[in-house]
Amino acid sequence: MSKREEIIKLYFLEGEIPADIAKKLDISKSAVTQVLQKDERYQREKMIRKESNKLSFMLFIAIIFMNI
């Protein structure tokens, strides 16, 4: 499997972040991001992950305030 294919698999199928992919493959984070930016799914996936993180954070805050 090529580095490009491995990056795509780790990001889209396994849900890893570029920094972790870079460490795992012993390449720079910018090299990972360059590969991902060439994939048409990247911007959509990035937006989905950002919104998901926001929702998770809001839920976390709500749980904290409910327990106070």
Image (cartoon, rainbow, N blue to C red):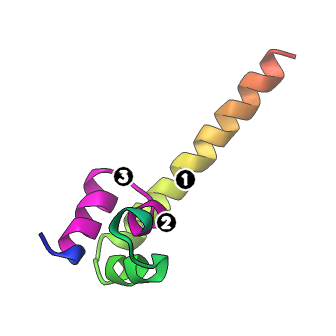
Whichever of labels 2 and 1 marks the residue nearer the N terminus, that label is 2
Residue 21 screen position, x and y as percent:
39, 64
Query: Residue 44 vs residue 29: left or right?
Result: left
For the residues labelled 1 and 3, the Cα–Cα distance comes to 14 Å
Secondary structure of the residue carrying numbered label 3:
loop
Secondary structure of the residue carrying numbered label 2:
helix
Whichever of labels 1 and 3 marks the residue nearer the N terminus, that label is 3
Residue 12 screen position, x and y as percent:
29, 59
Q: Residues within 10 Å of mark 1 (few under 14, many from 20)?
A: few
Q: Which residue is mark 3?
A: 15
Nearer to us of marks 2 and 1 is 2
Query: Residue 49 vs residue 39: left or right?
Result: right
Query: Residue 23 vs residue 60: left or right?
Result: left
Residue 67 screen position, x and y as percent:
81, 15
**Residue in view at x 34 percent, y 76 percent:** 36
Q: Which mark is residue 51?
A: 1
**Residue in view at x 40 percent, y 83 percent:** 31
Residue 6 screen position, x and y as percent:
22, 66
Q: Which residue is mark 2?
A: 19
Q: Which residues are magenta?
A: 5-22
| Foreground residue among 57 and 23 | 23
User: Looking at this rendering, what residue extends furthest in the front direction?
Assistant: 26
**Residue in view at x 28 percent, y 77 percent:** 39
Q: Residues within 10 Å of mark 2 (few under 14, many from 20)?
A: some
Please name the amino acid that badge 2 sits on: Ala
Asked if the stretch drawn in magenta spans residue 8, the answer is: yes
User: Looking at this rendering, what residue extends furthest in the top direction?
Assistant: 67
Query: Residue 33 vs residue 58: left or right?
Result: left
For the residues labelled 2 and 3, the Cα–Cα distance comes to 12 Å
* Most frequent secondary structure within the magenta stretch: helix
